[in-house]
């Protein structure tokens, strides 16, 4: 049974033991260990993890798949700000600040 990683320190300790090639590889490994971030990017109705870039869902056909509690990079809306307050270290680790103007 896989042990849940509960702290940032625990995750970083595990990362040091792995042969990480670059930042993109590191971010993919992190998402596989602790899950995707709720901080995401969007493009033409598709939603992507803000850390590793994997597609997480879409809103094509007027259906919104998997966007609950998400923070969309570049949005400065009240909903995203509220959702950002719900994000913990697992969501924020190696993800750029979603409210910076140059993230879009």
Image: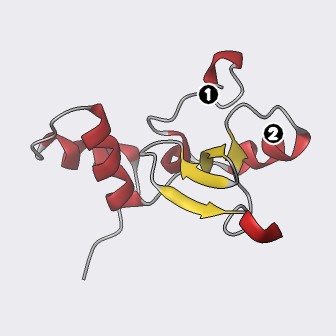
Residue at screen point 77% across, 70% down: 61
Q: Which colour style is shown?
A: secondary structure
Q: Residues within 10 Å of mark 2 (few under 14, many from 20)?
A: some
In the image shown, does 97 or 6 lie closer to the viewer?
A: 97
* In this view, 2 is above or below 87: below
Q: Relative to the observer, which residue lies in front, 14 or 80?
A: 80
Q: Is residue 78 above or below residue 68?
A: above
N-term mark: 1 or 2 = 2
Residue shown at 46%/39% (left/top)?
93
* Residue 1 drawn at (x, y percent): 24, 83
Q: Does residue 103 sit above or below 91 in this rendering?
A: above
30 on left or right of 89 = left
Task: Find numbered disc 1 in the image and state the secondary structure of the residue it sits on.
Answer: loop
Image quadrant where one finds the C terminus: top right
Label placed on residue 97: 1
Query: Would you identify the image quadrant in which residue 66 lies?
Result: bottom right
| Label at residue 81 | 2
Q: Which mark is residue 82?
A: none
Horizontal and vertical percent position of residue 2: 26, 76
Q: Report which quarter residue 98 is drawn in.
A: top right
């Amino acid at each position: 049974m896989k042990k849940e990683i509960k702290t940032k320190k625990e995750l970083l300790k595990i990362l040091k033991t792995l042969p990480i090639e670059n930042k993109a590889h590191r971010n993919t490994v992190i998402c596989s260990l602790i899950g995707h971030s709720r901080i995401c990017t969007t493009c033409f109705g598709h939603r992507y993890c803000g850390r590793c870039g994997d597609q997480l869902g879409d809103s094509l056909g007027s259906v919104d798949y998997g966007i609950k509690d998400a923070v969309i990079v570049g949005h400065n809306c009240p909903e995203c700000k509220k959702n950002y307050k719900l994000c913990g270290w697992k969501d924020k680790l190696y993800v750029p600040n979603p409210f910076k103007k140059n993230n879009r």
